[in-house]
Amino acid sequence: MAATQPSIGSVPVKSAAQQAAAMLLSVRELLVRQRTQLVNAMRGHAAEMGVVAPLGAKGLAELRTEIAAADDAAVPAAAKQAIALLGREAERIEARLRAIDTTLMQQHKANPVSRRLAAIPGIGPIGALSFALRVDASQFKSARHFSAWLGLVPRECSTAGRQRLGGISRAGDERLRQLLVLGATAVIQHAKPGRPATSQWLLNLLSRKPRKLAAVALANKIARIVWAMMTRGEAYRPPPAAA
């Protein structure tokens, strides 16, 4: 039925070369998830033994040191062995991720689109390369169509001529949407008058909306900037900083 509707656009088929170019990004995402699972398992098992450490790499290192030095009466040898095994697996994945990040950074520097997108506040090298390799901006008629494809527009629940808007649709590529929201959250955390990445629009938004809602709105705005830069081949033009 969808094929008979002229208003429904077709989905472009990616070539094998396009899929291969973005494959390393997918491998990186998988390894990051596995590392997170291992770290969470280590913290969970250590907590069962009464050992708790702060979050972050430094806290994890302290936890491993404390577990290894603990008395066998407090942390049995079998528990030490199991947690040490998880730690070694996390280290192995961390080494693979460092090698992958080096390769991805080389790809980013060699890709002119990725280099331009990285100038946008909230878009880092990995995010810029993800958009450059995974998105064909020419298939979208407008920036709003692009942000809708990313699931960053409100879900419409209208009936009987009455418009009702809900939360964002969360359609499209989940990873790209996540990169935008995380980047927008980082921008908001450092938003202050006078900073280059802080516009008056953002300050006004933060004065009216909770930070989570503001992050989604900013992610939507960043997505539209990404579409404009990719379709027009332009460099990023920062807005005037708020006084």
Image (cartoon, grey):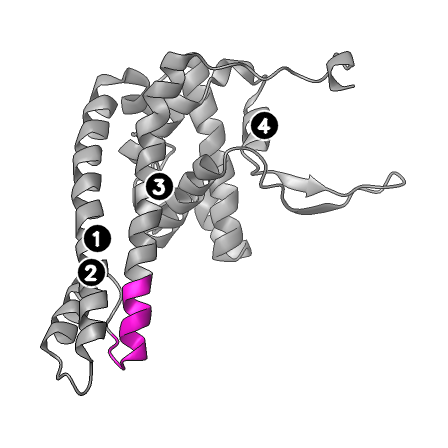
Query: Would you identify the image quadrant in which residue 75 lies?
Result: bottom left
User: Magenta: predominant secondary structure element?
Assistant: helix
Kindly identify which numbered label has been placed on residue 85.
Answer: 2
Sequence order check, earlier mark of 2 and 3: 3
Query: Real-space Cα distance between discs 1 and 3?
Result: 14 Å
Which amino acid does the dot numbered 3 rest on? Leu
Which residue carries the number 3 mark? 30
**Crowdedness near tag 4: few (<14), some (14–19) or many (≥20) residues, C-alpha within 10 Å:** some
Query: Real-space Cα distance between discs 2 and 4?
Result: 48 Å
Sequence order check, earlier mark of 2 and 4: 2
On whether residue 50 falls in the magenta region, the answer is yes
- Is residue 91 visible in the rendered structure shown here? yes
Do residues under tags 2 and 1 come within 8 Å of each other at their CB atoms?
yes
Kindly identify which numbered label has been placed on residue 89.
Answer: 1
For the view shown, which residue lies furthest in the front direction?
78
Name the residue located 32 percent from the left edge and 63 percent from the top edge.
41
Left or right: where 101 falls relative to 228: left
Judge whether 6 appears above or below 62 on screen: above
